[in-house]
Amino acid sequence: MQRNEEMSGLSEQGSNQAWKFEQNGINMVPEAERTGRPRDLFPIWFAANIGILGIVYGALIVAFGLNIFQSILTALVGAFSFMLVGYLSIAGRDGAAPMFTLSRAIFGIRGNFFPTLMSWINLLGWEAVTITTGTMSMMALLSSLGLAQSGTSAVMSMLLFAALVVLFGLLGQATLIKLQSFLTWVFGGLTLMVIALIIPQTDWQQLSSIPAGSWWTSFLPAVSIIMAGTGISWAITASDYSRYQRKEAKGSAIFWNVTLGGAIPLFVIMTAGILLSSAVPDLVSAGNPIEVIGASLPRWMTIPYLLTAVGGLIAQAVLSLYSAGLNLQNLGLRIKRTISVVFDACVMISVATYVFFIEQDFMGPFQSFLILIGVCLASWEAIFMMDYILIRKKAGYPKELLYAKHQQPETKQYNGAALSCWLLGIMVGLLFTNSPFFNGPLAVGIFQDSSLGVLLSFFVSGLSYTIVALVSKKTSTEA
């Protein structure tokens, strides 16, 4: 661990070199380069959430047996779970470093290895899911352009989609903002066009005739699943994109630009999915939901729709790959960020190849496995948030807590109390979680087939760490 982590990458030299690859690694971004404005964060998160797969989330909500009012309320609450991403983004302004670099101040440089590993696995897992879905979309697009579907077209589609993701994932922060802004306008507009074509297909009579579901056994589990796949899933990357913000940037401005950037497209697209579920009842169970949604649109819309699907998936995948590369450096590999991104891409493509070509029914269980990882990350997020509220708002993120080079002899390598709170939340969450890989003994009733275990782990870890932090603060004050 004794390495010059701050020099894991050379620094970009201002906006005149905006179109170069990202050079900053897990070092604190130099103050001269911290020129970001809160409004720059809006397109980053808007573009990352305009994907057509949000329609599947909407159909999933209705599948819980909710009426139209409850379904739309679920979409609204789930979308605004992005408030967690918005709040944690403020820490990026204060610490000027990636999320899991700042996390070292809580768990210790060596103790932070375990949460970082969980984050890296989670991000690569969802990358593989996105690559697989993107490959399906790219194959359908090539087929629409006259190329017959075959094993060769599948390989071409995967390599082409992955190459675009890797290329954009290597770009610097300033370029990323420009890219996401472009994707926001172009694919956001196309998505609205798709939604405009979906709304007339709505069977309003069928939707209005659905009786209200139970608020405890239907509404709450539905909300938990949407939150787990949106706000909680993205919160582990929050400061990766806010670390370039000016020191004087208002926290409230950062919060609302991130929150609304993610919540607005999510809510609109999930609402479209709720409406479409009346016309395409098998949407949730479809092996290729992109194809099913496309089949419900006019033929003239096929190519624009598939371009929208591919563009939205790329926008999502870019952020995941960007953050996964930073996490790999946080795990202790002495490599530049560009190399870490390429390495992550190779792992990602290998997993996606296995999923797509060999274990074709692997997607469902694989996503269940990622939900188990989500229990670990929700616990970490709660601790990070409470640590920021109780300690870091005033104390900040001093270098001696983040980098081995600056460590002082009395600095802890492991924070046993924080790690214990993290593990407690994970243990409780898993007790109330069931999946093809693991069935918790208490995963019954409202906890069965839901992600409530993820939320429970969040609250348990957050509460336990709050108690530990307050007791520790009181003890140090008395001493």
Image: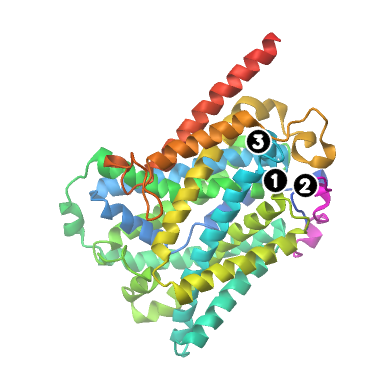
Task: State the CA–CA distance, disc 3 to disc 2.
Answer: 22 Å
Q: Amino acid at mark 1?
A: Arg
Per the image, the residue denoted by label 1 is: 243
Say which residue appears at 83% left-offset and 56% top-offset: 10
Q: Which mark is residue 346?
A: none
Label for residue 107? 3
Is label 2 in a helix, a strand or a loop?
loop
Instruction: Mark 1 or mark 3: name the one nearer the start of the chain.
Output: 3
**Along the line of sight, the residue nearer the viewer: 202 or 164:** 164
Per the image, the residue denoted by label 2 is 29
Magenta stretch mostly in which secondary structure?
A: loop
**Who's the residue at 58% across and 66% down the image?**
348
Q: Is residue 192 left or right of 125 when viewed as pictured?
A: left
User: Quick check: 110 left or right of 199?
Assistant: right
Mark 3 residue type:
Phe
- SS category of the residue bearing label 1: loop
How many residues crowd mark 3 within 10 Å: few (<14), some (14–19), many (20+)? Answer: many
